[in-house]
C-alpha cells in the first residue's frame, strides 16, 4: 500500500524493541509482551497523528497532513506457520443490549451486524472528517521472536454479497445450525459475529496486502537487575522521554472529573420514560412552527440537571466561547442561550448542525441547508442506527480562554454519566 502519511519506522522499531526487552517485568515469556495500548500510542507517536483510541470510536488514530486518514490499530500473536488471525474489530454490547438482535435468525443477524458496523464506521468518518477510501488497519503481528507490521484497507462490509461460510472459509448455501459463531464473507473479507459476546471479528491475512520487513524482538533476561542498579538513569534522555510519553493519555473521559472537566448532553428527551427526540425542538428546532425556518436551525439541549450537577461548567447565557469540532482545527463560536440556559448553539447556527447532521443522517447533503426542509424530523431510531445518542463536551483547562471540545458519545452514555454522580455521592 502506498503511504499517504509520514511514518518514522526507525523510531517505531527502536521504541518497540526497547519495550519488548522489558517483557520479564510483566510476563514469563517466552515471547515478547506488547500491550495493545502501547502499540496504539507507538503508532501515533511514529506518525505524529492524533490519538482517539479512548474515545469509543471505530478508529484508534487519525493521521495525514490533512488529518483525514483513519487508522484501526491492532496487535496480535500469530503462532507456528499460521498466516491468518480472527480478531475483534467492534463490540456491539450497547446495540445488542437494546434488543436489536432479539428473535433474529443467523442470516438476519449477519446482515444486522454488518449494517450497524457500516453505519458506525460511516458516522465516525463523518464526525472526524475522515476519508474512508484512504483509511487502513495497522497491525503489529508478533510471530516467534519478530514483530511484523501488516497493513490493509479499512473497508465497509458489502452487505449485498454476504454468504455463509464454514470454519475453512468454504461458501455454504445456508448458515449451519448450532450456537457457534456466525461466520460469513462479503466476497472480499471474512467475518464472524458472536451473539453471546456481542462482538464482530474479522480475518486478517498476512498473505494479502502489505507486510514490512520483520523487526527482531529480544527479551532482556536481566531487566530486573538493571532496574535495581539504575538502568533507566543511564539510557538516552530522548528515549527516556519517548517511553514516558507513550504512557500518557490526554483528555480522555475516564481520566477527567465528571461535572468539572466534562459533561454529557443527550440529544433526546426521556420525560415519558421512553427516549424520544422532540419533533419541534432540540436538533429538530427547524421543524417548529410560528415562522418560516431554515433546515439546520437547531441546538443541543442542556438539561437542568446538568447545570445542577456541573454548576459553572458553561459560561453564563449568551457569553461566547470557542467550541472545537472533531472535523476541524479551527474552533467555532458558540454560546449557551434560551430560558434556563437550556440550549447549546453555534454562531452561525448551521456550523454545529452541519456536523451533527452528517453523523446522524448518513445521506445528509450540504444542499439540504439551502432549501426549505423537506424531510421528516429526526427520531431516536436515527440515533440508534448510528450508535450515538448524545455528545460529550470537554472543557479545555490548558488555556485562559473559554474553550471546549465536543464529540459524539455512544448509546446510554448520558445515563452512565449521571450514574457517576450517584456512585460518587455513595462513597
Image (tube, rainbow, N blue to C red):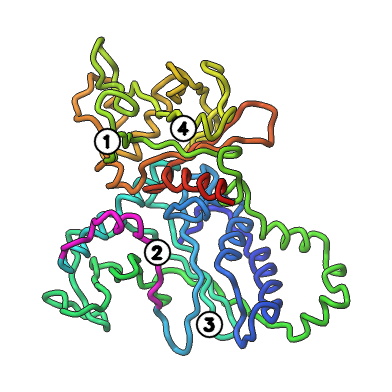
Point out the frontmost of discs 4 and 3: 4
Point out the frontmost of discs 2 and 1: 1
Image quadrant where residue 45 sits:
bottom right
Mark closest to the chain's N terminus, 1 or 3: 3
Point out the frontmost of discs 2 and 4: 4
Q: Which mark is residue 89?
A: 2
Q: Which mark is residue 143?
A: 3
Across and down, in percent, residue 287 comes to 25, 22
Point out the frontmost of discs 3 and 2: 2
Farthest-out residue, top:
291
Check contact, mark 1 vs mark 3: CB within 8 A: no
Image quadrant where residue 409 sits:
top left
In this view of the protein, which residue sits in the foreground, 338 or 202?
Answer: 338
| Residue where numbered disc 4 is placed | 305
Q: Secondary structure at mark 3?
A: strand
Q: Secondary structure at mark 4?
A: helix
State how far apart marks 3 and 2 are (Cα).
20 Å
Mark closest to the chain's N terminus, 3 or 2: 2
Q: Is residue 403 left or right of residue 339?
A: right
| Residue where numbered disc 1 is placed | 272
Q: Give the crowd class for mark 4: few <14, some 14-19, many >=20 residues within 10 Å.
A: few
Q: Is residue 384 left or right of residue 32?
A: left
Mark closest to the chain's N terminus, 2 or 4: 2
Q: Which residues are magenta?
A: 85-104
Q: Which mark is residue 12?
A: none
Amino acid at each position: 500500500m502506498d503511504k499517504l502519511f509520514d511514518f518514522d519506522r526507525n523510531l517505531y522499531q527502536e521504541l518497540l524493541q526497547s519495550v519488548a526487552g522489558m517483557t520479564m517485568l510483566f510476563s514469563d515469556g517466552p515471547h515478547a509482551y506488547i500491550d495493545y495500548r502501547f502499540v496504539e500510542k507507538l503508532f501515533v507517536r511514529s506518525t505524529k497523528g492524533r490519538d482517539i483510541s479512548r474515545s469509543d470510536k471505530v478508529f484508534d488514530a487519525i493521521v495525514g497532513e490533512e488529518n483525514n486518514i483513519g487508522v484501526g490499530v491492532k496487535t496480535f500473536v500469530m503462532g507456528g506457520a499460521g498466516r491468518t488471525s480472527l480478531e475483534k474489530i467492534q463490540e456491539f454490547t450497547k446495540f445488542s443490549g437494546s434488543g436489536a438482535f432479539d428473535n433474529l435468525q443467523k442470516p438476519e443477524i449477519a446482515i444486522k451486524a454488518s449494517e450497524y458496523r457500516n453505519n458506525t464506521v460511516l458516522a465516525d468518518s463523518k464526525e472526524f472528517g475522515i476519508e474512508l477510501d484512504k483509511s487502513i488497519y495497522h497491525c503489529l503481528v508478533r510471530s516467534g521472536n519478530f514483530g511484523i507490521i501488516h497493513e490493509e484497507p479499512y473497508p465497509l462490509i458489502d452487505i449485498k454479497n454476504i454468504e455463509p461460510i464454514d470454519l475453512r472459509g468454504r461458501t455454504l448455501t445456508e448458515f449451519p445450525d448450532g450456537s457457534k459463531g456466525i461466520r460469513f464473507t462479503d466476497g472480499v473479507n471474512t467475518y464472524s459475529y458472536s451473539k453471546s459476546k456481542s462482538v464482530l471479528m474479522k480475518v486478517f491475512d498476512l498473505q494479502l496486502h502489505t507486510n514490512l520487513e520483520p523487526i527482531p524482538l529480544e527479551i532482556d533476561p536481566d531487566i530486573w537487575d538493571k532496574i535495581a542498579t539504575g538502568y533507566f538513569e543511564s539510557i538516552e534522555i530522548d528515549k527516556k522521554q519517548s517511553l514516558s510519553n507513550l504512557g500518557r493519555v490526554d483528555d480522555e473521559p475516564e481520566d477527567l472529573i465528571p461535572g468539572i472537566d466534562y459533561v454529557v448532553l443527550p440529544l433526546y428527551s426521556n420525560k415519558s420514560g421512553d427516549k424520544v427526540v422532540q419533533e419541534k425542538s432540540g436538533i429538530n428546532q427547524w421543524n417548529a412552527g410560528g415562522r418560516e425556518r431554515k433546515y439546520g436551525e437547531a441546538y443541543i439541549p442542556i438539561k437542568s440537571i446538568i447545570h445542577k450537577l456541573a454548576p459553572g461548567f458553561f459560561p453564563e447565557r449568551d457569553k461566547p466561547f470557542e467550541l472545537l469540532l472533531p472535523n476541524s482545527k479551527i474552533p467555532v463560536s458558540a454560546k449557551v442561550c434560551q430560558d434556563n440556559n437550556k440550549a447549546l448553539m453555534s454562531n452561525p447556527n448551521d456550523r454545529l448542525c452541519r456536523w451533527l447532521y452528517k453523523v446522524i443522517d448518513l445521506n445528509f447533503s450540504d444542499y439540504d441547508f439551502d432549501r426549505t426542509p423537506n424531510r421528516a424530523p429526526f427520531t431516536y431510531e436515527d440515533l440508534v442506527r448510528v450508535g450515538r445518542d448524545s455528545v460529550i463536551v470537554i472543557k479545555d483547562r490548558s488555556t485562559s480562554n473559554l474553550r471546549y471540545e465536543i464529540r459524539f458519545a455512544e448509546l446510554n452514555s448520558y445515563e452512565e454519566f449521571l450514574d457517576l454522580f450517584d456512585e460518587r455521592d455513595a462513597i
